[in-house]
Amino acid sequence: MKKFIIIAIVLIIAALGYYFFVYGKNSNENPYEIDQITAEAFKGDLVVSIHSNGRVTPVQTVEIKSKASGEIIELGVDVGDYVHKGDLICRLDTATVMNSYLQAKADLNVAQVTVKKRRREFDRQKTLFEKELLSEQELDNTELLLEQAKASLVRAEAAFSIAQEQLEDTEIRSPINGIVLQKQVEEGQIISSGVSTVTGGTLIMQIAEMDSVYVVAEVDETDIGQVEAGQRVKVNADAYPDLNFEGRVEKIAPMASVEQNVTVFEVTTQIDNSEGYLKAGMNSSIEIITAEAYGAVLVPNDAVKDPEAVGYTGEIAQGEQKIGEGAEGQKRPSREEMREKMKNMSPEEIAELRKRRQEQQEAMADKKVVMVKREGQFVPQLVSVGKSNLDYTQVISGISVGDTVDATPVSMMMRQRAEMRERMEQRSGSMGGLRKSE
């Protein structure tokens, strides 16, 4: 008998030792307790944005060519120079063009004098004809000479205008305000006309308008749906890490392109560059602000959960309409139970049930669940949510600033529940072994 008692005591001590070894040395630890992360709802500003990389390009780039051909005798600008509209860029040799101009001017003067002379003759002949001192035939001949002189004057004026334009074309001026990006010629070089040759003429230089610039970025197709023309943009150039530039989305490419097996859309943003810091070709990082909410009630993203994910079957709004077929705290009927129930329903009742389900789905479209601390306990609260970024979500209604919420990630909750079940099974197994030993 004593031997049996001693063996029983040894087994009990061994079981207790195994229990404390498995579930921790601290007797105050609860093997069924789940770690919980909490946070407070607060008032703040929420910015939702898309990040990408881009390259600076001019808003307008003009290739400068000459209408005239000839030798460059003066080149007044260089790469990087800022020019205004109308500024002289270069001048060509005018020897040949000047001769044509002077000849045309002389022909014009002769034509003008001839017209004056023929008009005086016609006026004199007309007076004699009115006095019946001159025949009609003689008057007609004089009038014909006047008309011929007028025609010659028109031709001379046209020739002079062409010669004058050709002379002006020997001076090439900037058509825009901008910066010289490239210079392709030097003084003494002979260039060809851009309008009279098959090759399109000699490129003199490129001038770009840089008071405002484009930053062209590629946005992933998964984000492009959030981008709209007119949205605010922040740009940070690699060359000026401490400077921020702002602008707006100008346009979105209508067709995607594939870069390294990734489908992207080209987004063009226009940035103010009145200070002239940004240069064509600079690399930059770009932030497109797709949504903003100021003074909003914010909670961590992990505090906002789908009703289905947490098994929520509570009320939709002010306790008026229920989710599913059960009231708050009741288990949602299974599909088999619903099928069995619908067998005994009339077509009208089935139609009404489907209509009610549709209304419930629409009412829940923008609804989420937040576990809020009420009287020391966390209870599910249905909320309406707005915008969200990588960290926080805007809560439009359902909770207030200062409310304590459960911000435990769903994945962490599921993992802890699995671990708790495993501990329970281990404990159940150990106790079963103890009973068996007895």
Image (cartoon, rainbow, N blue to C red):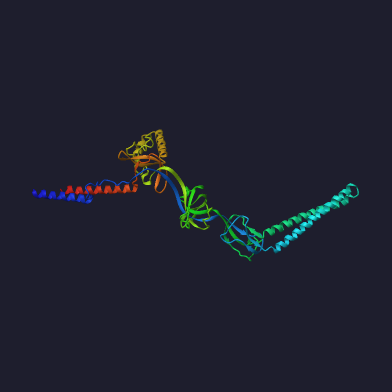
The image shows residue 368 at horizontal and vertical percentages of: 38, 42
Q: Nearer the viewer, residue 89 or 260?
A: 89
Residue 361: where, in percent of width, then height?
A: 41, 39
Q: How far from the left and from the top, in percent, is residue 222? A: 45, 50
Give 303 or 355, whichever is nearer the viewer. 303
Image quadrant in which you'd find residue 94:
bottom right
Tell me the residue at 80%/55% (across/down): 113
Q: Is residue 27 above or below residue 57?
A: above
- Measuring 79% from the left and 56% from the top, which residue is drawn there? 111
Residue in the foreground of this view, choosing between 236 and 158: 236
Residue 222 visible in the displayed image: no
Query: Farthest residue in the bottom direction?
Result: 188
Give left or right: position of 96 versus 267: right
Instruction: Identify the residue at horizontal 46%, vertical 47% (top origin).
Output: 290
Which percent across, then down, holds residue 236?
47, 54
Side (left or right) of 164 relative to 353: right
State which quadrant residue 199 falls in.
bottom right
Total marks in image? 0
Q: Is residue 343 above or below residue 67?
A: above
Horizontally, residue 268 falls left or right of residue 75, namely left
